[in-house]
Image (spheres, rainbow, N blue to C red):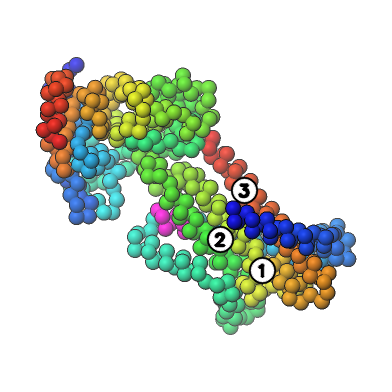
Amino acid sequence: MEDPMTSGKEPTVRLDNLWVRFLEKTVLKDITLSLWPGQLTVLVGPSGSGKSTLLRSINRLNAVPDCRTEGTVRIRLHDRSIDVYPDSFPLSELRRRVGMVFQTPAVLPFSIEKNLAMPLRVTLGLTGVALSERVEWALREVSLWSEVKDRLGEPAPTLSGGQQQRLCLARVLALEPQVLLLDEPTASLDFRAAASIEALLSRLKKRYTILAVSHSLSQTRRIADRVCVLKEGQLVQEMAGHHLEDADAFQQLMDAAF
Amino acid sequence: MGALLVATLLLGFLLLRGMKSITPALFFGETPWLEAITGQTPVFEGIWPALVGTIFLVLLSSIIAIPVGIASGIYLTEYASRRQRAFLGLMVDFLSGTPSIVMGLFGFAMILLLRRTLAPKAQTSLFLAAFCIAMLILPYLIRTTEAAIEGIPRHLRLLGPGIGFSKWQNIRHVLLPIASRGIFSGIILAIGRASEDTAVILLTGVVAHAGIPRNLWDKFEVLPFRIYYLAAEHRNSSELEQGFGTALVLLFITGLLFLMAFLLQRRAEKRWKTR
C-alpha cells in the first residue's frame, strides 16, 4: 500500500503542540501528530495515559468548564481547512465531520430505524425518501442491511453486541464524516463480533481517516497501519510498516514503550 | 412484601367498611343523577361536587407543577453550575421539607397581602389552592426528573454531543425520552400527593357544601376534606360509613388518574420509540 506520509498527501488532521489540562492535572503534554486519509492509526498506551482525551480533543468533546486546551488542531474538510481551537467553527458541524464511536455501543432504546433516522432528521433536516435512502446506505456501509432490513421497526437493544456497535458506526457514517474517532470500539464485544468490526474497519479506512484507541496489542497489529504509543500524556513512540509485520519485534517495542 | 401487605390490609378494611355505602345516594343525595351531572340541579348531600373539585384541583395543580418541575430538574442537571446546583438543591430540599399546613398558611398570607395591596377583592379559591398544592408537589417532580436524567449511562449521555446535537437537541431527543419512565414515576407521586392533601386546602378555599366551582376563583369542595369532615363531625354511624365510602371513591379516582398518566406515557413512549 502507498504510504500517505511519504506520498505527498496532505494530512486530514494535524495536532501541533497540543496541551490539555483538567483543573491542575495535565493530561496531554505537547502532542504533535498528523493523521492521513486512507490510513488507520491506532493509539495505544496504559490506562490513564490520555488516549481518550486525545481523541476527544479532535472533536472538542472535552469542552467542559474545567478543561483547558492549548495548541492547535487543524482539520482539512474537502477544500477548506479549519482550526478546532479557538472554537470559532460550529461545534455541530465539526462533530458531524469528525464522527465518534464509543467503547459501549450507544444504542438508544428506540427502533433500529429511528436510531439512524432521528439524528439525520435533527441535524440535517432529512425527511421522506432522502432519509430512508441514507438509512439504507449507512446500514449497507456497515454490512448490517441484510441482517436488519426486515425488522427495522424492532427495538435496537435486541440486536447482538456486534450488531449494535455496527449500528453505532452506521449512525456516524450516515452523517458523512471525513474522520472517524473510535474509542476502543471492540472492547465490550466477543471475539467473533470484534473480528467483524475489524474487517469493517479495514474496509472503511480506504475512504476515511481513522484514529482508534485499542487495548489489545494483537488487534492493534492486525488492523493498524501506524501505531502511536501514549504514556503519561506524551507521545513516546510511533511505529509503522515493517515494525508491525514482525510480531516479535512489535512485542519488544511495545514492552519497551509500556 | 411489607408494602403489599399494608396495601392489601388497607384496601380490605376500606372495602369492608365502605363498600355498602357506595350507592347513587352517596354521590348525588336526593338529586337525580342526570340533573346533577349536567349541572342543572345543585347537589347538597352527595359527594359529587367534592369529586369534581378533586379532579379539577389535581389537574390544575398538575398543569402548573409538571412543566415547571420537569424544567427545573432539567435546568439543575444540564445547565446549572456546581454552585447554583448546590444552592438550588438546598432550596428544593427546603421546599420538600415544608409541612403542608405551612404551605396553606403561605397561600392564606398571600391572599391577605393581595387584599391589602393590588386586589382588595381577592379571596381564597380553587386557583389559589391549586397553586399552593403545586408548590407542595414541585420538589417530587424536580427530584425525580433530576434522578432520572442523572441515571442515564455516560455512553448514552455523550451520544448526542458526539453526533453534533446541540445541548437542547440532546435533551429533547435523547435524554428526555430515555428518562421518561423515571419522570413519569415522579408525576404519579405528585398526583397522589395532590389528591390527598387536606391541610393546604383548609386554608386556601375549601368550604363544606360549596358545590361545583363555577370558575377558578370560586370556593370548592374536595374528597379528602369531605372525608375529614365526615370523620370529625359525623352525627350518626351511617355518616361515618359514608366517610369510608368516600375514601374508597378517592382511592378509585386517584387510581384512575394514575391510569390516565400511565396510558399517556405509554402512548408517548411508543411514538418516540419508532418515529
Residue drawn at point x = 38 percent, y = 61 percent: B85
Q: Label 3 belongs to which residue?
A: B262
Q: Is residue B1 left or right of residue A131?
A: right
Helix, strand or loop status at disc 1 = helix
Q: Quadrant of residue B124?
A: bottom right
Q: Residues within 10 Å of mark 3 (few under 14, many from 20)?
A: some
Residue B77 highlighted magenta (yes or no): yes
- State the image coordinates of residue B200 (x, y, percent, origin top left): 62, 72
* Image point (53%, 62%), residue name: B138
- Disc 1 and disc 2 on one polypeptide chain: yes
Q: Amino acid at mark 2?
A: Ala
**Which callout, 2 or 3, points at the residue further toward the start of the chain?**
2
The circle on residue B65 is 2
Residue A214 in sight from this viewpoint: yes
Q: Chain of mark 3?
A: B
Magenta span contains residue B79: no
In space, the residues marked 1 and 2 are separated at their CA atoms by 15 Å
Q: Quadrant of the N terminus of chain A?
A: top left
Q: Are marks 2 and 3 in contact (CB under 8 Å)?
A: no
Quarter of the image where one finds residue B106: bottom right
Residue that carries the numbered disc 1 in the rendered image: B126
The nearer-to-camera label among 2 and 3 is 3
- Residue B145's tag is none
